[in-house]
Image (cartoon, grey):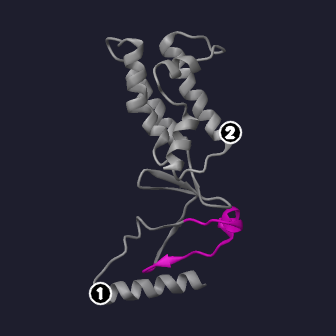
Amino acid sequence: GSMQQMLNECAKYCLEFCLKFNVEKTKIMVFGKASNAVSDLSCIDLNGRSIEFVSKCRYLRFYIESSNHFKLSYKEDLCGFFGSVNSLLTCMTRPKEHVLLQLLYSNCIPKLSYGAAVKDMTVTEMQQMNVSVNNLIRKIFGFRRWESIRFLREFYNYDSIEVIFAKARRR
């Protein structure tokens, strides 16, 4: 098809100008209606080697998911957040609550909010991130799951995840 023809032209150009594609790092991701039917698409190759179709790939620190539209995944951000939280909470000597809260907002929250200005989060995804942060604040201060921590955030002058994302988008 036309994609194969384009790649052939690129390969021809690269050969002419002593450039080389790294086929190991070259992937194909499909967006739109065909994203669910990748197995039905014909194989595409570069210099005689087949290029892999993927449903998710990493670019810079973003994970891009194949779907009906361009989508950045938030799941890896949550995993990074929980990893940094676990490191924070397993210190030999546990710092005071306000220090833990500052460490949470300076070291862990950035894992969730990286690229907030361009991430198009669903309400459910945003809620899941918010619950994760709120549960951690509850854990730090010894609150029960049903107790509100809003006044703690306000007292220490920290924003909610929703506010952090909204500010990033406005900038």
Q: Is residue 145 left or right of residue 139?
A: right
Choose between 51 and 169: the one closer to the eye: 169
Residue type at tag 1: Phe
Query: In the rendered picture of this protein, how many numbered marks are placed on residues?
Result: 2
- Name the residue tied to disc 1: 17
Q: Quadrant of residue 134?
A: top right
**Magenta-drawn stretch contains 44:** yes
What x and y, as percent, mark residue 133? 54, 27
Mark 1 burial class by Cα count in 10 Å: few <14, some 14-19, many 20+: few
Left or right of residue 138: residue 80: left
Whether 152 is drawn above or below 20: the answer is above
Residue beneath disc 2:
124
Q: What span is colored magenta in the figure?
A: 29-48
Instruction: Say which of 53 and 6 sits in front.
Output: 6
In the rendered image, the quadrant that contains the N terminus is: bottom right
- Residue at the image point whose x is 50% and y is 46% from the top: 168
Percent from the top left, x then y, of residue 35? 66, 64
Query: Residue at the spot x=37%, y=87% of the render?
Result: 13
Q: Position of residue 124 (x, y in %)?
A: 68, 39
- Residue type for callout 2: Thr
Q: Secondary structure at mark 1?
A: loop
